[in-house]
Image (cartoon, helix red, strand yellow):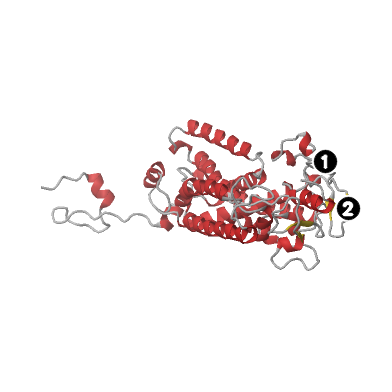
Amino acid sequence: MRCPLSFSAVVDYAEPFPAPATKSPPVMMKRPNMFQRYFGLYPLEQRIEDKKRGVGVQRHPIACWVLSAAMLGVLIYELVTNSKAQGSPFSFKPVVNPMLGPSSSALIQLGARFPPCMKNVTDVPITTVVPCLNNTANPATQLCSLEDICAFGGFHNETPDQWFRFITPIFLHAGLIHFLLNMLAQLTASAQIEREMGTLPFLVLYAAAGIFGNVLGGNFSLVGAPSVGASGAIFGTVAVAWVDLFAHWRYQYRPGKKLLFMIIELVIGVAIGFIPYVDNFAHLGGLAMGLLVAMALYPIISPSNRHRIIVIALRIAAIPLAIVMFVVLIRNFYKADPYAACTWCRYLSCIPTSSNNHCKGCVYSLSCTLFKLTRSTTPSCHTQNRYVSIFTIMAYRALTHHAY
């Protein structure tokens, strides 16, 4: 015996042509496809219900899976490279990598963001000597030129121009621990964002946030330390949650409580950026660009004309603002002294102490001396080099035969 259907059920699910209810059951309408979901081309009530249930544009986070697999492959290659050079996949000599990964020299050679490989840096000229990949002695006995460590064809004694180092660090990780932490976030929070946005908009967001994080970090982070990781891109995907919260406030469950937790999470994330080996500028840059790209591309439900007009205006403003931020900071990186442009920015990723000369000079008592292949010395305490890199310290010990 059939269960009786209500009139509303028949109207909602019946085909557009009439069909006698006594002869055959009503045929259900097809669920909206990916294109209809992204552009909201199906009934408003159903879109609101999908939002409350957490149903997004697609079911599977394909890009997150592919990116994570690619990053795993790159990490394995990093460890193999370090193993061939030092006899161990993890760097323990001359410096221990606390993330259980390769040496800094290996990361630079594989594509880490390292300004001296990207432009002329006063404090780290191309004549600077650094430990080779196979060096495990302390003090260093195997020294290589900066050009050799930067690899990718070198500079041919010309100006360093490896611009691609704004991109390649996204796929590199400092070690096994760093990789696992990032993948935990990418396969949970970022994966849900991809489900809600769709793969193509997600990839635009991911790339823009990751690259801009490296652009901002290249401007204001330590010029003597390599930087790697997908944290900027992941922070960009997390920024989508902020856009979603305020755009769909009325559809969120207990939005005030959710906002409080998101603020706490943001404060913790920024605080983590002050820990050594973590680049806070990559986090902040990814977050800022993520907000703009999410505003431009994230599917937003507009229940009224007023809401729709506000959303359209914000979308139109977000795109040129994102482009301007990219252009200004890339130009500043190559054409100007970033610290002169923003004297206080350094404190967003550095706690001033006497050990780092209050984020202005150097760690250790070496007066920021850089040692060149000719063994001549050039004192330089330029504000852009907030501390002398471990490369410089090791080169100093090797050339002057002091214990390290």
Q: Position of residue 382 (x, y in %)?
A: 84, 46
Look at 54% across and 56% down and name the residue there: 71
Is residue 313 visible in this depiction of the protein? no
Which one is nearer the viewer's eye here, 63 or 277?
277
Q: Nearer the viewer, residue 151 or 134?
A: 134
Sequence-wise, the earlier of marks 1 and 2 is 1
Q: Amino acid at mark 1?
A: Ser
| Place of residue 220 in the rendered image (x, y in percent of width and height, measured from the top left) | 73, 46
Q: Is residue 382 above or below residue 128?
A: above
| Mark linked to residue 164 | none
Instruction: Please give the residue where the numbered disc 1 appears in the rendered image.
Output: 365
* Kind of residue indicated by mark 2: Thr
Query: What residue is drawn where x is 71% and y is 39%?
Result: 350
Q: Is residue 116 visible?
A: yes
Label 1 and label 2: CA atoms lie apart by 15 Å
121 to the left or right of 212: right
Q: Nearer the viewer, residue 364 or 40?
A: 364
Left or right position of 334 against 291: right
Left or right, 350 with reference to 21: right
Mark 1 surroundings: few (<14), some (14-19) or many (≥20) residues within 10 A:
few
In this view, 343 is above or below 331: above
123 lies above or below 85: above
Q: What is the secondary structure assignment of the residue under circle 2?
A: strand
Label annotation for residue 377: 2
Mark 2 neighbour density, 10 Å: few (under 14) some (14–19) many (20 or more): few
Count of numbered circles in the view = 2
Q: Can you tell which quarter of the image residue 372 is in?
A: bottom right
Q: Residue furthest left?
A: 1
Q: Position of residue 86 (x, y in %)?
A: 64, 57
Label 1, secondary structure: give it.
loop
Give percent across and percent down for residue 184.
Answer: 50, 46
